[in-house]
Amino acid sequence: MDYYFFDLDKTLYAYDFRRRLPALAELTGSSQYHLARSWWADGYEARAEVGEWGTADEYLDHFALVTHTRRLSLEEWASARARAMTRIDGSVAALRRASQLGAVSLLSNNPAATAAALPLLVPDVIEILGGNVLVSSSLGAKKPDELAYLRALGAYGIESKDAFFADDSAANCAGAAAVGITAHHFTQLNGVYQTDALLTAIEEFAAR
């Protein structure tokens, strides 16, 4: 069976961190600058993305501890992230089409809190995926590290020749191609996501 892997941010849903940070600042009562510097610039998000804090509760506990803010609930944290996300209709339609041609899975660089919040953030995507969700925090490696793709293949017991991968990052696509996965670089042209090209790539992979 063929497997179709999709990135989340800027592939299935548009993502703008500049809209997320003000929402987090409002929830925590802290400044955007303080949150960005203490958590993101100081590398804590990157550490979370490779699984240093393996559960949503551990992530939220450490976020509060490091930023010296009140401890957010998962629902609060998700509400701030949701402010930065906008569904790309054509991409979700392509995901649905891929699910008719084989199995589909998410393959995203994200911490455990994002994985836990997906039913709140992207219920439409979760319905299509049927439980097939892989994030870097559970894999212990981030794209474009080849290990991330190899562990993703191993999670489903498939060979690279039977895998298709879509991502907005050229580097991530190169990492997938390096282990033999058919990779599609999802792009924008004049600010318009090229969802037709994504769908064509999926159909061509299925017909190979």
Image (spheres, rainbow, N blue to C red):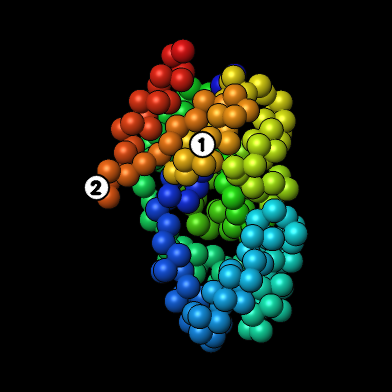
Q: Report the front residue among 182 and 112.
A: 182
Taking the spot 61% from the left edge, 38% from the top edge, the residue there is 132
Mark 2 Cα-neighbour bin, 10 Å: few <14, some 14–19, many ≥20: few
Mark 1 Cα-neighbour bin, 10 Å: few <14, some 14–19, many ≥20: many
Question: Residue 10: x percent and y percent?
Answer: 43, 49
The amino acid on which the numbered mark 1 sits, given as a three-letter code, is Cys
Give me the C-alpha separation between circle 1 and circle 2. 21 Å
- Which quadrant is home to the N terminus? top right
Question: Residue 77: x percent and y percent?
Answer: 56, 69
- Vertical side of 200 occupied by 66: above or below: below
- Vertical side of 50 occupied by 128: above or below: above
Residue at the far top in the pictured view? 208
Mark 1 / mark 2, whichever is N-terminal:
1
The amino acid on which the numbered mark 2 sits, given as a three-letter code, is Asn
Examine the rendering and report whether any part of residue 9 can be seen: yes
Question: Residue 199: x percent and y percent?
Answer: 37, 29
Q: Which residue is mark 2?
A: 190
Question: Residue 30: x percent and y percent?
Answer: 54, 85
Taking the spot 41% from the left edge, 19% from the top edge, the residue there is 204
Q: What label sits on residue 10 in the rendered view?
A: none
Examine the rendering and report whether any part of residue 127 can be seen: no
Q: What label sits on residue 173 in the rendered view?
A: 1
Q: Secondary structure at mark 2?
A: loop
Q: Report the front residue among 203 and 183.
A: 183
Taking the spot 52% from the left edge, 42% from the top edge, the residue there is 171
Residue at the far left in the pictured view? 190
State left or right for residue 25 relative to residue 43.
left
CB under 8 Å between callouts 1 and 2? no
Taking the spot 53% from the left edge, 58% from the top edge, the residue there is 120
